[in-house]
Image: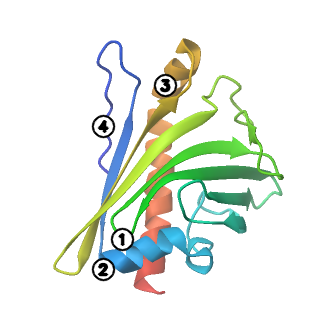
Amino acid sequence: MTEPTTNSTPGTEPRISVSRTFAAPRDIVFKAWTESERLSRWWGAAGFSMLVAKLDVRPGGVFHYGMRSPDGLQMWGKFTYAEVAPPERLVFRNSFADEAGNPVRHPFCPTWPLEVLTTLTLVEHDGVTDLALSGSPINANELEIETFGDGIASMEQGFSGTFDQLAEYLANP
């Protein structure tokens, strides 16, 4: 299951760290994060439908996506890749976005940081893959950093649901 931790040492940004073990080889898990058809089948909030507007997995490339809730609420997000090291590591800036891909404030929380630097690592052991994801706000003011720290429990819950969807996808690709 997802194992959250928070770095709350004075003078440092809060950090979300979640991990999960998947019953699939690392290269398949990496492809699930980097191929449009695969990513669209599991990424996003539970119960939301997914749209991949753009996926260009390379340093400087972008994953721009939309999610629609069952009641019609639509939200957009964007990853801007800083590092791509197949099949073991992705580093990206994560932000909410508009339909055109421009970074925007969180639709329900105006003090959420505009960007979160996220690192995903994958390690394979005997055909199973350990995934570790961590992230912390960048270019954020004190209030945004505090808001992020206060939101870690909610993010943990969200990643747990998203990783459940990834596990289901990997069991039935």
Check disc 3 and report the residue beneath it: 150
- Drawn side of residue 47 relative to residue 14, left or right: right
- Drawn side of residue 120 relative to residue 138, left or right: left
**Classed neighbour count for the residue bearing mark 3: other residues with Cα under 10 Å, few (<14), some (14–19), many (≥20):** few
Check disc 2 and report the residue beneath it: 25
Task: Find the distance from the CA under tag 2 to the CA under tag 3.
Answer: 35 Å
Task: Find the distance from the CA under tag 4 to the CA under tag 1.
Answer: 25 Å
Task: Find the distance from the CA under tag 2 to the CA under tag 1.
Answer: 10 Å
Dot placed on the residue nearer the N-terminal end, 3 or 4: 4
Amino acid at the residue labelled 3: Asp
Residue 33 — which label?
Answer: none
**Classed neighbour count for the residue bearing mark 2: other residues with Cα under 10 Å, few (<14), some (14–19), many (≥20):** some
Q: Is label 1 or label 3 in front?
A: 1
Q: Is residue 120 above or below residue 31?
A: above
Q: Position of residue 90 (x, y in %)?
A: 43, 57
Model colouring? rainbow
The answer to whether the residue labelled 3 contacts the one labelled 4, judged by CB atoms less than 8 Å apart, is no
Q: Is residue 13 visible?
A: yes
Check disc 4 and report the residue beneath it: 5
Task: Find the distance from the CA under tag 1 to the CA under tag 3.
Answer: 32 Å
SS category of the residue bearing label 3: helix
Dot placed on the residue nearer the N-terminal end, 2 or 1: 2
Check disc 1 and report the residue beneath it: 87
Amino acid at the residue labelled 4: Thr
